[in-house]
Image: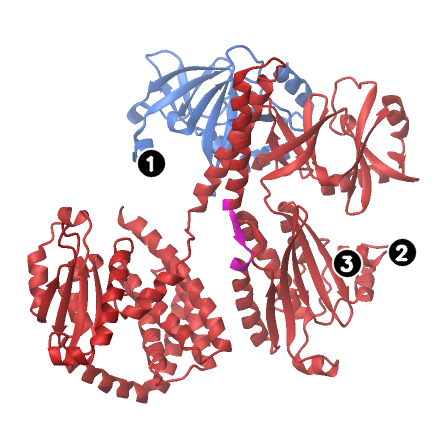
């Protein structure tokens, strides 16, 4: 029953895809994986906050992983998923957020000692969110995401201030809904 | 349970004790002779001492022990209640509250406070000093005296797993004097034993002997003599009979509650039984969870109703209607559980008024009315701070010093009144003072000075009062440590708005001021009107709606130059949500429109289609959206879609800006 203890020991990671890259999130952070569903647009919200969904009576805000990483909005396919994440911000407030991703690959076990240090400068993705790299059977590299850092409210506000492509907003949300 | 969960229990228990203690002390201040209250205070001190030492809060144990001594003297009539004692006790209360959070003195302030408290107590003890010696003598006499104790040993199942050597325990007990074990239930298996013990030793010695099974025992001192000595017994037979009956009571109750108040005499035991109300304290998180489940049930229920909404007869429908009825009942019941009386927060106000008025040399009486009116627990919690602020204002600015009051022909003692009442679907909470009132001229001047008003603008009295709730508007002439730092009524207003409530001031110069707060009993559920714009759905509170109507789209487009439409022989501003929210979908031919009347101001929301009434189970809109101030919540519709609740107050300011631009 001791949930908190168990959480710490989990070395299993959910692998999801964004364009051609793979990312890993510790399974303890993922509460749920939802199929793509209708997202209700919230007027005047920042562009990466694409709307809210009804998660068993709760109102869950959903973030587009692509816009969050500063690339073009995600194109919804039948494989698109929403990961329901348990986010702990720096002031210890937990919130639930939905992260819309291209598709969820698999769940694998990654031993801490096999994790390589994060990539150097010049990468597409800001490395402060990336805690390490993992190479699976000499194939492609998987980036380990610090999802708390990536999605905490402070970060969101900062991003909001820098005001990324506000104009994209309308087309993006429309695509999601249709 | 590990130790930390015990500690949480302790802190909870201690907090409740402290609240009761504060209440008692404040009463005691008014009626220093009230022996029952003194008894209560003493008992709380004693209990606190006991539990805090048990959980290793030695500092608290030490303080309460000293205070207990003082109150014991008072109880015995060897010392009288003074203002100093009450002050010190209250101060100690506050300090104990801090210590509960910070036992290890990690905050250096607490060390200083601790010293202060200790010194204050020492002062009183020094005053009581001479008498204390007397008391000691008295106690010595008691010690040598023979008395009879009744010990009821009532173990639960855990006694087996705890591996206690019961034989050794009782051997030690029996070594203290002569004893007799009484079996009362010959026909049944024993589940408890009643032991009469005649000893010269004190209660503490008995407790020591039974140390490991103390929790399973109930010890009462029943007589000051040897009950086994028949001569003495006959003399006191009446008394003994009483004890026997009351013991039965104690036996019955000891199964459920193992009182730590071992020292209580039998009579008080019965009293305690009477005092118990049928209330239970529940973790508010559990209630939140219950509310969540209920709202989920309601949503699912209406979804079910929607899908089976065919015209043909179906036996399922009958059950469905029943289910619908039951879930509605269930919901109103669940809401009721969360309601607590306003009285619960009145106590902290009384304390505040007492302390502040003393500090400012003012005489203020606190009167409450209708405090049994109930409100949602969350609302009460969130309301306490703004109310506190208003009361602080009343004390600081409203009520004058006794001298000034006498000059004005008033009683020297000012009155602050807290009134709560129901009216329609709303709850009203009023704070009234009979102080100097608000000078509208001063507000007018200040408003012009700060640019809130133009020099020649004509404003009503109400508008002037409303200005006081604007950020950055504070009329206090001199800043004091109590109020008037510029953050004031605007924060109050903000807090009230968060509760979907409204606040209003009324004041007559020289006579006093009253603040009225209008609230919903439960902020979780609201009657709303549902409408759609494009593919978005919105809600507005039913009570704000003046009228529903419709306009030709062309007409609205023509009007968008001024953003005003005629209504009731005046022009009112409107907001075209298509345009406002930058929707790219096509305008329909007709735009259904809702006329809103909020705070005696009219405006129109030009929507697209009005769908109908919706009883909204409101959810907080996620933190990520908190900057969108025109949204105050969201609700899940019967078909699983989400609709957002519009905040008409905020929307109005937007609409007004549209007109200006």
At horizontal 55% and vertical 28% (from top left) the residue drawn is: B324
Residue placed under numbered mark 1 in the picture? A4
Residue B472 lies in quadrant: bottom right
Query: With respect to residue B559, does B121 lie above or below?
Result: below
SS assignment at label 2: loop
Residue range corresponding to the magenta coloring: B337-344
- The span from disc 3 to disc 1 (Cα, nearest Å) is 53 Å
- Badge 3, how many Cα within 10 Å: few under 14, some, many 20+? some
Disc 3, SS: helix
Co-location on one chain, circles 1 and 2: no
Residue annotated with mark 2: B458
Residue A115's place in the image compared with B492, above or below, is above
Can you identify the residue that label 3 sits on? B465
Q: Residue furthest right?
A: B569
Determine if the magenta segment contains residue B218: no
Shown colour of chain A: blue
In the structure shown, which secondary structural element does the residue marked by tag 1 occupy?
A: helix
- Report which colour depicts chain B: red
**Residue B636 at what x, y percent from top left?**
59, 28
* Residue at image point 17% right, 76% down: B147
């Amino acid at each position: 029953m001791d949930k908190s203890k168990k959480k710490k020991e989990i070395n299993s990671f959910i692998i999801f895809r964004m364009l051609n890259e793979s990312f890993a999130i510790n399974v303890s952070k993922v509460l749920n994986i939802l199929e793509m569903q209708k997202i209700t647009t919230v007027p005047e919200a920042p562009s990466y906050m694409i709307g809210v969904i009804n998660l068993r009576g709760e109102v869950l805000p959903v973030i587009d992983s692509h816009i969050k990483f500063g690339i073009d909005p995600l194109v919804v396919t039948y494989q698109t998923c929403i990961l329901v994440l348990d986010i702990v911000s720096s002031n210890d407030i937990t919130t639930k957020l939905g992260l819309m991703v291209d598709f969820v690959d698999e769940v694998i076990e990654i031993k801490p000692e096999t994790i390589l240090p994060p990539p150097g400068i010049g990468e597409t993705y800001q490395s402060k969110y990336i805690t390490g790299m993992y190479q699976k059977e000499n194939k492609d590299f998987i980036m380990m995401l610090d999802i708390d850092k990536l999605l905490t409210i402070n970060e969101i506000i900062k991003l909001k201030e820098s005001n990324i492509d506000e104009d994209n907003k309308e087309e993006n949300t429309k695509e999601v809904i249709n | 349970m590990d130790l930390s969960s015990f500690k949480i229990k302790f802190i909870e228990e201690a907090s409740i004790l402290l609240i009761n203690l504060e209440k008692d002390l404040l009463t005691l201040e008014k009626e220093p002779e009230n022996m029952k209250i003194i008894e209560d205070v003493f008992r709380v001190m004693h209990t606190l001492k006991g539990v805090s030492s048990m959980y290793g809060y030695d500092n608290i144990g030490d303080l309460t022990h000293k205070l207990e001594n003082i109150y014991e003297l008072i109880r015995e009539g060897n010392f009288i209640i003074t203002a100093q004692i009450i002050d010190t006790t209250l101060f100690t209360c506050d300090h104990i509250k801090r210590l509960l959070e910070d036992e290890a003195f990690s905050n250096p302030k607490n060390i200083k406070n601790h010293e202060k408290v200790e010194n204050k107590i020492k002062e009183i003890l020094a005053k009581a000093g001479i008498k204390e010696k007397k008391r000691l003598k008295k106690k010595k006499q008691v010690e040598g005296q023979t008395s009879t104790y009744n010990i009821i040993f009532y173990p639960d199942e855990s006694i087996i797993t705890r591996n206690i050597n019961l034989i050794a325990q009782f051997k030690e007990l029996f070594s203290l004097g002569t004893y007799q074990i009484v079996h009362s239930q010959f026909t049944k298996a024993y589940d408890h034993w009643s032991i009469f013990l005649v000893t010269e030793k004190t209660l503490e010695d008995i407790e020591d002997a039974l140390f490991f099974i103390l929790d399973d025992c109930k010890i009462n001192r029943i007589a000051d003599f040897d009950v086994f000595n028949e001569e003495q017994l006959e003399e006191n037979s009446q008394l003994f009979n009483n004890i026997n009956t009351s013991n039965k009571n104690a036996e019955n109750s000891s199964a459920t509650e193992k009182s730590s108040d071992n020292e209580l005499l039998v009579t008080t035991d019965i009293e305690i039984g009477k005092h118990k109300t049928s209330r239970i304290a529940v973790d508010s998180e559990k209630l939140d969870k219950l509310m969540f489940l209920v709202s989920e049930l309601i949503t699912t229920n209406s979804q079910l109703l929607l899908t089976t909404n065919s015209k043909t007869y179906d036996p399922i429908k009958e059950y469905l209607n029943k289910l619908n009825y039951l879930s509605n009942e269930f919901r109103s019941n669940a809401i009721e559980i969360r309601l607590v009386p306003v009285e619960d927060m009145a106590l902290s106000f009384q304390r505040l008024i007492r302390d502040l008025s003393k500090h400012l040399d003012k005489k203020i009486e606190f009167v409450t009315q209708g405090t049994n009116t109930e409100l949602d627990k969350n609302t009460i919690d969130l309301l306490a701070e703004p109310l506190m602020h208003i009361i602080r204002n009343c004390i600081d600015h409203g009520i004058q010093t006794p001298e000034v009051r006498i000059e004005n022909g008033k009683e020297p003692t000012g009155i602050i009144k807290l009134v709560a009442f129901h009216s329609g679907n709303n709850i009203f909470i009023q704070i009234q003072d009979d102080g100097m009132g608000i000078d509208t001229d001063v507000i007018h001047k200040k408003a012009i000075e700060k640019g809130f008003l133009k020099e020649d603008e004509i404003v009503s009295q109400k508008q002037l009062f409303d200005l006081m709730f604007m950020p950055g508007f504070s009329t206090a002439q001199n800043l004091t440590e109590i109020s008037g730092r510029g953050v004031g009524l605007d924060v109050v207003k903000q807090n009230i708005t968060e509760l979907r409530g409204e606040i209003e001031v009324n004041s007559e110069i020289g006579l006093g001021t009253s603040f009225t707060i209008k609230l919903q009993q439960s902020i979780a559920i609201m009657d709303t009107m549902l409408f759609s714009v494009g593919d978005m759905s919105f809600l507005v509170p039913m009570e704000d709606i003046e009228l529903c109507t419709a306009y030709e789209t062309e007409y609205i487009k023509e009007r968008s130059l001024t953003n005003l439409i005629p209504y009731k022989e005046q022009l009112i501003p409107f907001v075209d949500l298509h345009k406002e929210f930058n929707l790219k979908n096509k305008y329909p031919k007709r735009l259904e429109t809702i006329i809103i009347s909020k705070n005696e101001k009219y405006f129109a929301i030009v929507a697209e289609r009005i769908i109908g009434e919706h009883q909204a189970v409101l959810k907080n809109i996620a933190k990520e959206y908190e900057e969108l101030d025109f949204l105050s919540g969201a609700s899940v519709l019967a078909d699983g879609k989400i609709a957002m609740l519009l905040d008409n107050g905020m929307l109005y300011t937007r609409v007004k800006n549209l007109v200006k631009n």
